[in-house]
Image (cartoon, grey):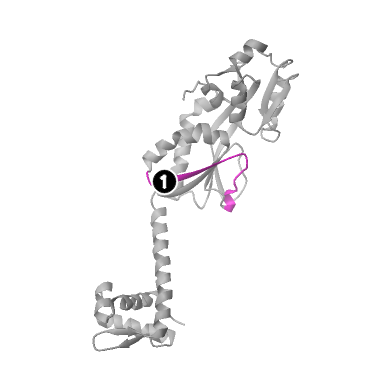
Amino acid sequence: MDMRWDDLRYLLAVARQGSLAGAARELRVDATTVGRRLEALEKALGTRLVLRGARTLALTEGAEAVVARARQMEDSLRALHATVAADARTVGTVRLSATEYLGHALLAPGLADLHARHPGLDVELVVGSEVADLQRGDADLALRLAPPRGDALVVRKVAEMAFAMYASRGYLRRRGAPRPGDFHGHAVLAYRAGLTSGAESDELNRLTAGARRLLLSNSSPVLREAAAAGLGVALLPCLSGERDSRLTRVGAGVLAKRSLWLVVHKDLQRTPRVRAVSDWVAELCKRERAGLAGTAGATE
């Protein structure tokens, strides 16, 4: 069957207009061209589609079924065109995956700036400890503490994120400041096993020897609030601890640093809407570099 979509456009125009002349005006061609294309379509389908009268055309019963399917195709093509047009502009939805802490402390406060730059963008911010599979399409972008593997992924380092120990002033007045390597009589609030790197975990164990692990959690906000309530000394990202006026850093230095990675599927990296969010995340990390690295105070 040698049928062309373009010929179906002529049939749809005839169905809408009811005449060769009307279809010709709609398609901006002459009536002879409309007639010729209809004949070509009839030949390709092997059936009569129109009954020609003196001034009008009537569709055959078979043509009605063809027109119904052709309208569906036309609607699908319009939707496809709209999608492609949207992808060529910074409009649409971008799904961004991050840890709960990064979503809460870093990304969410900056979303107003992103929307001001690109009013047509919508963001689906998915947070949690579960790693989104970008190769499977779980997200368009991800901000991670560990670089993923995969030939389909483009990965770039955007910052260093430091961790330190924090406690409330009330806790330190009651218990005193713990000494590195001797945390006897103190309570430690830390991440559950598997959520910190080997080096970070080893350093935490060394510095807090003798402490009671009073609370383990997979949530930075949970650890921060528990520390602010005076429950113990918490391991927190410096950006979180320094921003909270209820907390003070225990010790002068940072406990450990982790690289922060921005990940995108290579098939999406040049899509305008995804590129716009990717650039914004990278700029945000650069702007907050000192706070993330624990080398400067940060304010709300």
Residue 6 percent across, percent down from the top left: 37, 75
Residue 123 percent across, percent down from the top left: 46, 44
Residue 205 percent across, percent down from the top left: 72, 24
In the image, is residue 18 above or below residue 169? below
In the image, is residue 22 above or below residue 285? below
Q: Is residue 102 magenta?
A: no
Per the image, label 1 sits on a secondary structure element best described as strand
Residue beneath the point at 38% across and 76% down: 8
In the image, is residue 106 above or below residue 29? above
Q: Residues within 10 Å of mark 1 (few under 14, many from 20)?
A: some
First to last magenta residue range: 119-136
In the image, is residue 255 above or below residue 60? above
Q: Can I make out residue 235 in this image?
A: yes
Residue beneath the point at 70% across and 20% down: 187
Specify the amino acid type for callout 1: Leu
Q: Can I make out residue 176 in this image?
A: no
Residue ranking furthest to the right? 210
Q: Quadrant of residue 145?
A: top right
Q: Which residue is mark 1?
A: 121
Residue beneath the point at 41% across and 74% down: 70
Camera-nearest residue between 182 and 19: 19
